[in-house]
Image: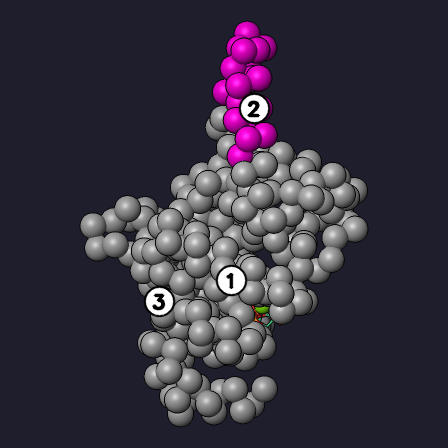
Amino acid sequence: ETADGIPLRVENLRKTFGGIVAVDDATFEVEAGSLTGLIGPNGAGKSTTFNCIAGAHAPDSGTVTFQGENITGLRPEQIANRGLVRTFQIARELEEMTVLENLMLAPKGQRGESLWRSVTPFARGEVVDQELEIRERVWEMLEFFEIDHIAHHEAGTLSGGQRKLLEMARALMTDPDMVLLDEPLAGVNPTLEEKLLERIHELRGQGYTFLLVEHDMDVIMENCEHVIVMHQGSVLAEGEPEAVQQNERVIQAYLGE
Ligand code: ADP
Ligand code: MG
């Protein structure tokens, strides 16, 4: 971690798709241990920003620094190895696998990649230990998110809310320091929403840092201590939730939606 306690710094980030400027000179920071909200009208560039931070897209220009290291343009697994992940929707090919299998696979190719790669045919004992270790963590995760009772259900049969819990559990399997959540509550019923938010706060108490994109302004206002507002690819405003909500430019930006 950096001495100034800022794990993530995005500077002058720019990403275009053909003629579309999705992210336009965006600059912001996320503090260690915070639950920071990233909001903005549809098309503001939030998801593209996430993709540039987590390595799914290479930005046209700008810098992403994580815990003092320049991670701009690194591959997603390289970034995950450094402790920064984003949640992903369960891919179609994983829908036929059980919840348990989805989690068993999660560390592979992400933060656990080095661990898996170190496995040689001459280290069978180690292989067993590592698998046991992963299995143990999987069950911890299943219990933490209260999805252990559906461990053997195929991922494709889960409700929208259960899916979101699994997506978050998958991201956490890599043992990250910071998690990017892109609309983790979309399609989630109020009971599960409450549970998910509780879990996020609990994890935050353990030292995890979260950057949360969420459409529901009440959720942002009630849960985030700092809010960054994007509009047309740039940061329009940021600050405490109440201040941001009353910001005239922010109100104007949302009126255009
Ligand atoms: P948000 O998540 O804030 O709704 P996005 O980052 O998804 O916004 O999109 C920002 C802009 O970039 C939009 O105009 C969107 O249509 C465009 N965009 C996003 N991804 C792509 C892509 N893969 N190809 C072309 N245009 C894209
Ligand atoms: Mg989006």
Rendered position, 90 above or below 35: above
At mark 1, the secondary structure is helix
Image quarter (top left, top right, bottom left or bottom right) of the C terminus: bottom right
Q: Residue at x 57, y 11 (%)?
A: 124
Q: Tell me which label, 3 or 1, sits earlier in the chain.
A: 3
Q: Is residue 189 visible?
A: yes
Q: Which residues are magenta?
A: 117-137
Residue kind at label 2, given as amino acid type: Leu
Find residue 228 and report its horizontal and vertical position in percent: 40, 73
Q: To which residue does mark 1 refer?
A: 197
The dominant secondary structure in magenta is: helix
Q: Nearer the viewer, mark 3 or mark 1?
A: 1
Q: Are the residues at dot 3 and dot 1 in contact (C-beta closer than 8 Å)?
A: no
Distance from disc 3 to disc 1, alpha carbons, whole Å, reads 24 Å
**69 relative to 132, above or below:** below
* Residues marked 1 and 2 touching at CB (< 8 Å): no
Give the Cα separation between the discs numbered 3 and 2: 40 Å
Q: Is residue 21 visible?
A: no
Residue bearing the label numbered 3: 28
Q: Nearer the viewer, residue 63 or 87?
A: 87
> Going by the image, does 96 lie left or right of 251?
right
Residue underneath mark 2:
132
Describe the element under mark 2 as helix, strand or loop: helix
